[in-house]
Image (tube, rainbow, N blue to C red):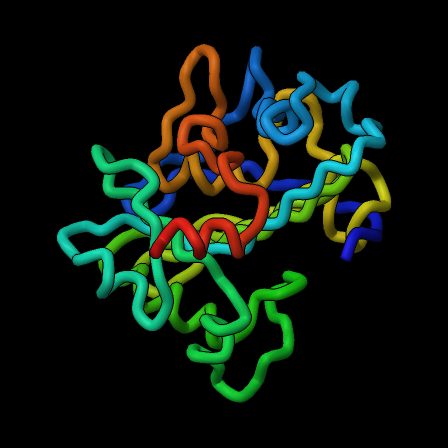
Protein backbone atom coordinates (compact mmCIF):
# COMPACT_ATOMS: atom_id res chain seq x y z
CA UNK A 1 0.00 0.00 0.00
CA UNK A 2 3.03 2.27 -0.38
CA UNK A 3 2.92 4.84 -3.31
CA UNK A 4 1.97 8.55 -4.18
CA UNK A 5 3.00 12.35 -3.74
CA UNK A 6 2.24 15.23 -1.27
CA UNK A 7 0.42 18.19 0.29
CA UNK A 8 1.09 20.46 3.27
CA UNK A 9 1.08 18.71 6.64
CA UNK A 10 -0.87 20.97 9.01
CA UNK A 11 0.27 21.94 12.48
CA UNK A 12 -2.83 21.92 14.65
CA UNK A 13 -4.03 24.68 16.91
CA UNK A 14 -5.33 24.07 20.45
CA UNK A 15 -8.54 22.03 20.27
CA UNK A 16 -11.84 22.24 22.06
CA UNK A 17 -11.17 18.94 23.81
CA UNK A 18 -8.79 20.36 26.34
CA UNK A 19 -6.10 18.13 24.82
CA UNK A 20 -2.73 19.62 24.08
CA UNK A 21 -1.99 21.55 20.93
CA UNK A 22 0.43 19.85 18.55
CA UNK A 23 3.64 21.80 19.05
CA UNK A 24 5.94 23.00 16.32
CA UNK A 25 9.31 21.33 16.67
CA UNK A 26 12.77 22.63 17.28
CA UNK A 27 15.82 20.56 18.07
CA UNK A 28 14.75 16.90 18.01
CA UNK A 29 12.41 16.68 15.03
CA UNK A 30 10.06 13.84 15.93
CA UNK A 31 11.68 11.27 13.64
CA UNK A 32 13.34 9.07 16.26
CA UNK A 33 10.49 6.56 15.77
CA UNK A 34 12.37 5.57 12.61
CA UNK A 35 15.47 4.73 14.63
CA UNK A 36 13.32 2.56 16.90
CA UNK A 37 12.17 0.53 13.90
CA UNK A 38 15.46 0.35 11.97
CA UNK A 39 17.91 0.40 14.84
CA UNK A 40 19.64 3.37 13.21
CA UNK A 41 19.15 7.09 13.91
CA UNK A 42 17.89 9.91 11.77
CA UNK A 43 16.63 10.72 8.33
CA UNK A 44 19.78 9.37 6.67
CA UNK A 45 18.26 5.94 7.26
CA UNK A 46 15.16 6.52 5.17
CA UNK A 47 16.90 4.66 2.36
CA UNK A 48 18.00 1.74 4.52
CA UNK A 49 17.21 -1.34 2.42
CA UNK A 50 17.02 -3.75 5.34
CA UNK A 51 13.79 -5.79 5.38
CA UNK A 52 12.30 -4.11 8.46
CA UNK A 53 8.50 -4.10 8.43
CA UNK A 54 6.13 -2.20 10.73
CA UNK A 55 2.33 -2.06 10.40
CA UNK A 56 -0.03 -0.48 12.92
CA UNK A 57 -3.70 0.43 12.71
CA UNK A 58 -5.34 1.40 15.98
CA UNK A 59 -7.52 3.72 18.02
CA UNK A 60 -5.98 5.62 20.93
CA UNK A 61 -7.99 7.05 23.82
CA UNK A 62 -7.95 7.45 27.61
CA UNK A 63 -9.96 5.46 30.13
CA UNK A 64 -11.29 8.62 31.83
CA UNK A 65 -13.05 6.55 34.49
CA UNK A 66 -14.19 3.83 32.08
CA UNK A 67 -13.10 0.19 32.29
CA UNK A 68 -10.69 -1.27 29.75
CA UNK A 69 -13.35 -3.71 28.53
CA UNK A 70 -15.98 -1.01 28.00
CA UNK A 71 -13.55 1.13 26.00
CA UNK A 72 -12.38 -1.82 23.88
CA UNK A 73 -15.76 -3.44 23.18
CA UNK A 74 -16.32 -5.05 20.72
CA UNK A 75 -12.56 -5.47 20.42
CA UNK A 76 -9.66 -5.66 22.86
CA UNK A 77 -7.30 -3.05 24.27
CA UNK A 78 -3.84 -2.56 25.72
CA UNK A 79 -3.12 -0.07 28.50
CA UNK A 80 -0.07 1.80 27.19
CA UNK A 81 0.61 3.91 30.24
CA UNK A 82 -0.99 3.10 33.60
CA UNK A 83 -0.16 6.47 35.09
CA UNK A 84 -1.84 8.30 32.21
CA UNK A 85 -4.55 5.67 31.41
CA UNK A 86 -3.74 5.78 27.68
CA UNK A 87 -5.30 2.88 25.77
CA UNK A 88 -4.53 1.33 22.36
CA UNK A 89 -7.28 -0.63 20.57
CA UNK A 90 -5.81 -2.73 17.71
CA UNK A 91 -7.94 -2.54 14.56
CA UNK A 92 -8.02 -6.07 13.16
CA UNK A 93 -10.25 -7.46 10.43
CA UNK A 94 -12.42 -9.01 13.15
CA UNK A 95 -12.87 -5.62 14.85
CA UNK A 96 -13.53 -3.94 11.51
CA UNK A 97 -16.27 -6.46 10.78
CA UNK A 98 -17.91 -6.04 14.18
CA UNK A 99 -18.23 -2.26 13.84
CA UNK A 100 -19.10 -2.32 10.14
CA UNK A 101 -22.05 -0.21 8.97
CA UNK A 102 -22.27 -2.18 5.75
CA UNK A 103 -20.23 0.44 3.92
CA UNK A 104 -16.60 -0.57 4.27
CA UNK A 105 -15.16 1.81 1.69
CA UNK A 106 -12.26 3.92 3.04
CA UNK A 107 -13.23 7.42 4.12
CA UNK A 108 -11.56 10.79 4.83
CA UNK A 109 -8.78 9.91 2.31
CA UNK A 110 -7.32 7.24 4.61
CA UNK A 111 -6.35 3.86 3.20
CA UNK A 112 -8.29 1.75 5.72
CA UNK A 113 -10.46 4.01 7.90
CA UNK A 114 -14.12 3.02 7.46
CA UNK A 115 -17.42 4.54 8.55
CA UNK A 116 -17.78 1.89 11.25
CA UNK A 117 -14.42 2.74 12.81
CA UNK A 118 -15.23 6.46 12.60
CA UNK A 119 -18.53 5.80 14.37
CA UNK A 120 -16.85 3.92 17.21
CA UNK A 121 -14.13 6.57 17.55
CA UNK A 122 -16.79 9.30 17.72
CA UNK A 123 -18.60 7.37 20.48
CA UNK A 124 -15.40 6.97 22.49
CA UNK A 125 -14.62 10.65 21.99
CA UNK A 126 -17.73 11.66 23.93
CA UNK A 127 -15.78 10.77 27.09
CA UNK A 128 -12.19 11.53 26.04
CA UNK A 129 -10.18 12.65 23.01
CA UNK A 130 -9.81 9.68 20.65
CA UNK A 131 -7.41 9.24 17.74
CA UNK A 132 -7.08 6.90 14.78
CA UNK A 133 -3.56 6.04 13.59
CA UNK A 134 -2.26 4.02 10.66
CA UNK A 135 1.38 3.36 9.75
CA UNK A 136 3.09 1.10 7.25
CA UNK A 137 6.86 0.98 7.00
CA UNK A 138 9.27 -1.32 5.19
CA UNK A 139 13.00 -1.14 4.62
CA UNK A 140 13.41 2.54 5.48
CA UNK A 141 10.33 3.87 3.63
CA UNK A 142 6.70 4.23 4.61
CA UNK A 143 3.86 6.46 5.71
CA UNK A 144 1.82 7.48 8.75
CA UNK A 145 -1.65 8.98 9.05
CA UNK A 146 -3.81 10.10 11.95
CA UNK A 147 -6.87 12.08 13.03
CA UNK A 148 -8.48 12.96 16.37
CA UNK A 149 -12.07 13.44 17.59
CA UNK A 150 -13.62 14.99 20.68
CA UNK A 151 -17.33 15.15 21.41
CA UNK A 152 -17.99 13.36 18.14
CA UNK A 153 -16.23 15.97 16.01
CA UNK A 154 -12.85 15.98 14.26
CA UNK A 155 -10.72 18.47 16.19
CA UNK A 156 -7.19 17.60 15.03
CA UNK A 157 -5.90 16.46 11.65
CA UNK A 158 -6.20 14.56 9.46
CA UNK A 159 -2.43 14.28 9.20
CA UNK A 160 -0.82 12.46 6.24
CA UNK A 161 2.96 12.03 6.19
CA UNK A 162 5.50 9.91 4.35
CA UNK A 163 9.22 9.29 4.58
CA UNK A 164 9.94 9.84 0.86
CA UNK A 165 8.16 11.71 -1.90
CA UNK A 166 5.96 9.34 -3.88
CA UNK A 167 5.69 6.63 -1.23
CA UNK A 168 1.95 7.19 -0.68
CA UNK A 169 -0.99 9.05 -2.24
CA UNK A 170 -0.71 12.70 -3.42
CA UNK A 171 -2.03 14.14 -0.14
CA UNK A 172 0.77 12.53 1.89
CA UNK A 173 3.89 14.65 2.23
CA UNK A 174 7.37 14.54 3.70
CA UNK A 175 7.17 16.88 6.72
CA UNK A 176 9.66 19.76 6.74
CA UNK A 177 12.60 19.60 9.12
CA UNK A 178 11.43 20.26 12.64
CA UNK A 179 7.88 18.99 12.04
CA UNK A 180 6.55 15.68 13.43
CA UNK A 181 5.23 12.65 11.63
CA UNK A 182 1.47 12.03 11.86
CA UNK A 183 1.49 9.65 14.85
CA UNK A 184 3.60 11.99 16.95
CA UNK A 185 1.15 14.77 16.09
CA UNK A 186 -1.87 12.89 17.44
CA UNK A 187 0.06 11.55 20.43
CA UNK A 188 1.03 15.10 21.38
CA UNK A 189 -2.60 16.19 21.03
CA UNK A 190 -3.85 13.34 23.20
CA UNK A 191 -1.43 14.43 25.92
CA UNK A 192 1.72 12.33 25.50
CA UNK A 193 4.75 14.41 26.41
CA UNK A 194 8.13 13.91 24.78
CA UNK A 195 11.28 14.28 26.84
CA UNK A 196 14.83 15.33 26.08
CA UNK A 197 15.80 11.87 24.83
CA UNK A 198 12.57 10.44 23.36
CA UNK A 199 9.76 11.62 21.09
CA UNK A 200 6.09 10.75 21.74
CA UNK A 201 6.26 7.51 19.74
CA UNK A 202 9.11 6.28 21.92
CA UNK A 203 7.61 7.49 25.20
CA UNK A 204 4.60 5.18 24.79
CA UNK A 205 6.79 2.49 23.18
CA UNK A 206 4.77 2.03 20.00
CA UNK A 207 7.79 0.30 18.51
CA UNK A 208 7.65 -2.59 21.00
CA UNK A 209 5.54 -4.61 18.50
CA UNK A 210 5.82 -4.52 14.71
CA UNK A 211 2.26 -5.41 13.69
CA UNK A 212 -1.34 -4.81 14.69
CA UNK A 213 -1.70 -8.56 15.25
CA UNK A 214 1.17 -8.53 17.78
CA UNK A 215 -0.62 -5.73 19.66
CA UNK A 216 -3.76 -7.86 19.68
CA UNK A 217 -1.81 -10.79 21.13
CA UNK A 218 -0.62 -8.47 23.92
CA UNK A 219 -4.23 -7.93 25.00
CA UNK A 220 -4.80 -11.60 25.92
**Residue 96: x %, y % from top left:** 50, 73
Residue with the most extreme bottom position: 102
Residue 91 position, x and y percent, is 49, 62
Q: Is residue 170 above or below residue 81?
A: below
Q: Quadrant of the N terminus?
A: bottom right
Vertical arrangement, residue 123 with respect to residue 171, above or below: below
**Position of the C terminus by quadrant:** bottom left
Q: Residue at x 53, y 88 (%)?
A: 102
Q: Nearer the viewer, residue 127 or 88?
A: 88
Tell me the quarter of the picture where residue 13 sits.
top left
> Would you identify the image quadrant in which residue 29 lies?
top right
- Image position, residue 30 (x, y; %): 57, 25
- In percent of the image, x 39 and y 39: which residue is there? 14
Residue 116 coordinates in the image, percent (x, y): 47, 76
Instruction: Tell me how many marks there are.
Output: 0
Q: Is 28 located above or below residue 33 in the figure? A: above
Front position in the image: 218 or 178: 218
Asked if 36 appears above or below 165 in the picture, the reply is above
Q: Residue at x 47, y 12 (%)?
A: 197
Residue at 84% x, 39% y: name it. 165
Left or right: 11, with 220 as reference point = right
Amino acid sequence: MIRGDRQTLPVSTPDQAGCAAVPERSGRDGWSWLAVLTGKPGRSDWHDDGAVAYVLEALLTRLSGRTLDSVAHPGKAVLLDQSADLVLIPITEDFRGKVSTGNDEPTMRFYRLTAGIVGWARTLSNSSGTAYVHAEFFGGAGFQAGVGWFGGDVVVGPFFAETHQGVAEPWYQVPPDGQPMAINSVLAWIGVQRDSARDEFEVVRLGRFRSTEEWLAATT
